[in-house]
Image (spheres, rainbow, N blue to C red):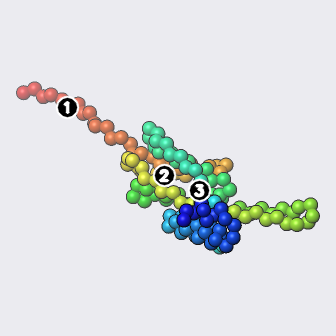
Amino acid sequence: MALGNLVRHPGPARRVVRRDFDRLVDDLWSGFGLAPVAFAPTGPATPAFSPSFDAVELEDAYRVTADIPGVDPGDVEVSVEDGVLTIRGQRHYEDESEDAEGGVQKLSERGRFERRIRFPGEIVETDVKATHKHGVLTVTVPKPAEVKPEIRSIPVETA
C-alpha cells in the first residue's frame, strides 16, 4: 500500500505513519551530524547554525568571509593545520520581552557551526589573519611569495 493512501485516511494509521516517517527522517539526518530546521530534533539537542561562507582567490592571498550575525568574537575559533583552515563557533541569543497583559515572551536561539577549507595551492600558515566586524568574519590566508629565478651577470674573462 502506498504511503499516500495511508496518510489520506484519518485515524490511528495516519498517526503511526507520520511518527514513523518523522523518526526515519530524524535518523537519516542524524547520520550527517546536522539536522535541517524543518526536522530539528526536539529536546535538549542543540540545533545547527549554518552561516554562509565565501572564498575568493586573490593574487597574493585567499580571502574567506563568513556571515555570522549574533556570534560573539570570543565564541569563534580559527585554526590552520596541514593546509586546512578550520572555522568553528557557536551562537547564543536570548531576548525577553513583556507583552501588554504582563506575560513574558522569551526567545532563545543556540547553534554550533564548523567549516573546513582546503586551499588548492600552498599557503603561509604562520601569517593567517582573522578579523570580526559587524557580524562578518574575514580570514586572510596569504600565499607564499613566488620565487623568481635570480639573474646573475657573469663576467667574461679574457686569456
Q: Residue at x 36, y 40 (%)?
A: 146
Q: Which residue is denoted by mark 2 in the rendering? A: 128
Is residue 75 visible in the rendered image? The answer is: no
Q: Which mark is residue 107?
A: none
Q: What kind of residue is marked 3?
A: Ser
Relative horizontal placement of residue 147, taking residue 123 as reference (left or right): left
Q: Which residue is denoted by mark 1 in the rendering? A: 154
Is residue 152 visible in the rendered image? The answer is: yes
Labels 1 and 3: the sequence-earlier one: 3
**Quarter of image, res 76:** bottom right
Labels 2 and 1: the sequence-earlier one: 2
The answer to whether residue 61 is above or below residue 154 is below
Labels 2 and 3: the sequence-earlier one: 3
Q: Residue at x 43, y 59 (%)?
A: 81
Q: Residues within 10 Å of mark 2 (few under 14, many from 20)?
A: some
Q: Which residue is denoted by mark 3 in the rendering? A: 50
Q: Nearer the viewer, residue 3 or 47?
A: 3
Q: Residues within 10 Å of mark 1 (few under 14, many from 20)?
A: few
